Image (cartoon, rainbow, N blue to C red):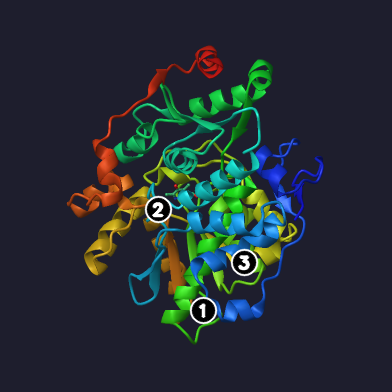
Amino acid sequence: MNYYSTNRQSPIVGFKEASIKGQAPDKGLYFPETLPQLDKEFIRGIENYSNEEIAFRVITPYVGKEIPEEKLFRIVSETVNFPIPLVPISESISSLELFHGPTLAFKDIGARFMSRCLGYFLKDNSKKVTVLVATSGDTGGAVANGFYEVEGVEVVILYPSGKVSPVQEKQLTTLGKNIHALEVEGTFDDCQQLVKAAFMDAELNRQLFLTSANSINVARWLPQQFYYFFAYKQWLRNSPSDDKGPVISVPSGNFGNICAGILAMQTGLPVKHFIAACNANDIVSEYLETQNLQPRQAVPTLSNAMDVGNPSNFVRILEIFNHRFPELKNILSSATITDTETIATISEVHQQYNYLLDPHGAVGYLALQRYLAGQPGQKGIVLETAHPVKFPEAVENCTGQPVEIPTAVQSIMKKEKKSIIIKTDFGQFKDYLLK
Ligand SMILES: *Cc1c(COP(=O)(O)O)cnc(C)c1O
């Protein structure tokens, strides 16, 4: 498979180069030249395949021969080696729980796949690769965990001091070895500025091989299709007669996740409709009404992993539809959910169904409930993107009960935090990277 840049000013590249580069030189996003079509027999018989086999089938056309089959199968097996259950909440809504991976958020899938691909591509590199990531919480943990002990790769994570949740902070700061946490005395935007400045710095780029692990990388984006297929497999089990597929609601920030779902649909996965569930940062909702995409400064909300004012992956959704607005509108709707509504939804769903949503899942749930109210007889799936324990304050305030800490994180909560505190000063960051 070849990839072109959405800005169309960069050379075509293969999967390897696209995943090492991350972003195209013209600052566009890499996009596959053709959309592979999945075998209809495979989709009809999807219940007969293991998750590993499904993932392997889905990703193979995108990787081509750049990773040998056996190795690629091992990579996808390690990527999806935890449960991704579809759990019924109400009569019409089920939750696809994407939070059973090592860092309790859906980003584990993309990060695990990407880190293993890069590890493979860079194994014979003489120069070590330094992955720089700025995080507001979830990305850093997933990337740190994914790259942990990957040979030839050092990971430097910048996070805003005091602005990530306790579980998130432990996930960033307790691994050690090739994972380094910098605690920045500033905001997430400051962290991002420092990373951007590093990529622009000539001296740093001479001395180090810098790359990023953010969500625009094709090796993080494409594997996110996997769990849409896993969802359908389980959906058929519960609704065998409904092979038109579910309505799917995706809590969205940078739109990488939902864009992967739409890609899966365009290549043959049955889905009735997609809902982009947004918090107050709702420029896509505005776009769907006005056809005008107007980036804004992000405002902070309870579902903070979705606080994005300029969703970088949206251009890929436009690309999937060849920028044809009516076709896009047929498949995609959006909803804007306030913090007040998010809190009320967590409480109600907990009381009514004894199911605990996190703030991101709650945004998705309410958006789906509203949509289904106008579509009698239809049923849907909400992607529950994070475990509620990652956002304990919001959740405990709603339910009045402490969130149970899953065993997977009990042990890291006891580990010692190791971070280096830095100011928002680029000189200090650069000195750190050079030594
Ligand atoms: C990153 C994240 C999102 C947003 O996903 P996008 O792919 O950026 O739209 C939603 N929920 C959680 C918990 C996240 O960590």
Image quadrant containing the N terminus:
bottom right
**Viewer-nearest of discs 2 and 1:** 1
Q: Quadrant of residue 326?
A: bottom right
- Mark 1 closeness class: few <14, some 14–19, many ≥20 residues within 10 Å: few
Can residue 378 be seen from the camera position used here? no
Q: Give the Cα separation between the discs numbered 2 and 1.
A: 24 Å
Q: Amino acid at mark 3?
A: Arg
Q: Which residue, given by chain and number where applicable, does mark 1 sit on?
A: 48
In the displayed orientation, state which residue is furthest to the bottom.
241
Q: Which residue, given by chain and number where applicable, does mark 3 sit on?
A: 57
Can residue 190 be seen from the camera position used here? yes
Q: Quadrant of residue 291?
A: bottom right
**Label 2 CB-ligand 1 distance < 8 A:** no
Q: Earlier in the sequence, mark 1 or mark 3?
A: 1
- On residue 101, the disc is 2
Circle 1: element type: helix
Circle 3: element type: helix
Q: Amino acid at mark 1?
A: Asn
Q: Is residue 73 left or right of residue 35?
A: left
Q: Is residue 407 left or right of residue 135?
A: left
The residue sitting at 68% across, 55% down in the picture is 63
The relative height of residue 50 versus residue 212 in the rendered view (above or below) is: below
Q: Position of residue 188 (x, y in %)?
A: 46, 31
- Mark 2 closeness class: few <14, some 14–19, many ≥20 residues within 10 Å: many
Counting the numbered discs, the total is 3
Q: Give the Cα separation between the discs numbered 1 and 3.
A: 13 Å
* Residue sitting nearer the eye, 111 or 391: 111
- Mark 3 closeness class: few <14, some 14–19, many ≥20 residues within 10 Å: some
